[in-house]
Image: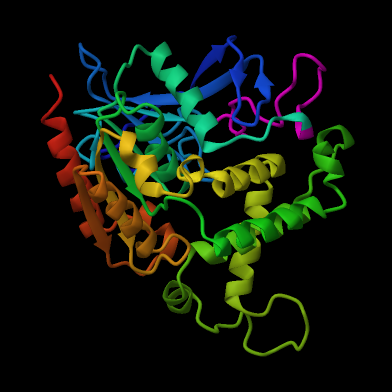
Amino acid sequence: MNTTNSIGIVRAQRAQFDTPLVFRSGAVLPRYELVYETYGKLNADKSNAILICHALSGHHHVAGVYADEPKNVGWWDNMVGPGKPIDTDKFFVIGLNNLGGCSGSTGPSSIAPETGVPYGASFPMITVEDWVESQARLADRLGIKQFAAVIGGSLGGMQALQWSLAHPERVRHVLAIASAPRLTAQNIAFNDVARNAILTDPDFHGGDYYQHGVVPTRGLRLARMLGHITYLSDDAMADKFGRELRTEQLNYGYDVEFQIESYLRYQGDKFAGLFDANTYLLMTKALDYFDPAHDFGGDMNKAFARSKSDYLVVSFTTDWRFSPQRSREIVQTLLHNRRNVSYAEITSTHGHDSFLMEHPHYFDVMRAYLDNVASEVSR
């Protein structure tokens, strides 16, 4: 791997919390662990910290590589590093695996100390609000009273927005990318179909498949295939695959014939071998539940009245899962509340996945905004 402008070798860290966490649902998790990574140096007054919130299938490994896994590059390595838009020469950057995840933080596949077996179906239903509270505890552990910025794409953007509502004094800037103030009915429908693929898999066993020594691979594979279609744009799929066949002739059957079919099945199989089905269910439900206006009679303007942050909102023209219209709703709400907000709508062919791509205009917007944020912090 070419490590130019890369963080280089990184390592994961663990933080154990013995103070019970009360979930929004009323459930209580007596103790838990969060796995996280940090990049760059925290300055003397701890004013240069940035929190990266991950999307549905993300995790703590945001940038760099591991010494024993040089090909395991962080999922946002193109964005985070020395001289990159999220510049680790200027900021102390934190990436963590959300509670309920399957990349090291306590989740359904973790062993429950009370029973000695994986939590499975007994793991509490989690919300974006619960994630933010657990993240705030990690910030406390690190001595960070206020973040220079909280940044996230997709579901990560929802977490960034929630930070400015739950802890308005603790975040100066919010960067919400390819996100939405709440899901549309169509998005909830997509999530429900994906979950049903898992829930109806014979190997699911009500969420306690660990004890049976099986994995609901078929359901998780189908859920990922469906999700992946919604992350791409029609133009991107047409440009990359079109109607190209794997062989020179039609087979007139149900086996894989088109290249797009082969690609989706590969992505589904790959994901099913890496990700936990219970975590997928929890993450998609957290997406469904997020609605800051719920406690304000559906009025998003009232929900954001408590915010004190400045914002950068970014959308992408071909993102139909979290369309530019949804980002503009966020902007209108912030303007209504007289918040400082910048908005960029980036022309891109990559659909929802655009927020992960190295696009010059997108990167210039991020760099320019964060350079201004850097000018506010002490050296």
Residue 361 visible, this orientation? yes
Instruction: Quarter of the image for the C terminus: give it.
Output: top left
Instruction: Please state which of residues 309 and 268 is positioned toward the viewer in this rendering.
Output: 309
Residue at left offset 86%, top offset 32%:
211
Residue at left offset 23%, top offset 47%:
366
Residue 1 visible, this orientation? no
Query: Where residue 191 appears, x then y in whole percent?
Result: 63, 56
Is 359 on the left or on the right of 274, as rendered?
A: left
Q: Does the magenta run of residues contain 100? A: yes
> Splitting the image into 4 quarters, where does residue 77 fall?
top left
**What's the magenta region?**
98-121
Q: Is residue 325 above or below residue 302?
A: below
Query: Where residue 94 appears, x then y in whole percent?
Result: 37, 27
Instruction: Please state which of residues 206 and 15 is positioned toward the viewer in this rendering.
Output: 206
Q: Does the magenta run of residues contain 18? A: no
> Splitting the image into 4 quarters, where does residue 162 fall?
top left
Specify the color scheme.
rainbow
Q: Is residue 158 above or below residue 223?
A: above
Question: Main SS of the magenta segment?
Answer: loop
Is 119 on the left or on the right of 78, as rendered?
A: right
Instruction: Quarter of the image for the N terminus: give it.
Output: top left
Q: Is residue 254 above or below residue 318?
A: below
Instruction: Please state which of residues 369 and 74 is positioned toward the viewer in this rendering.
Output: 369
Query: Where residue 320 appears, x then y in whole percent?
Result: 45, 67
Residue furthest to the front in view is 297
Is 52 on the left or on the right of 18, as rendered?
A: left
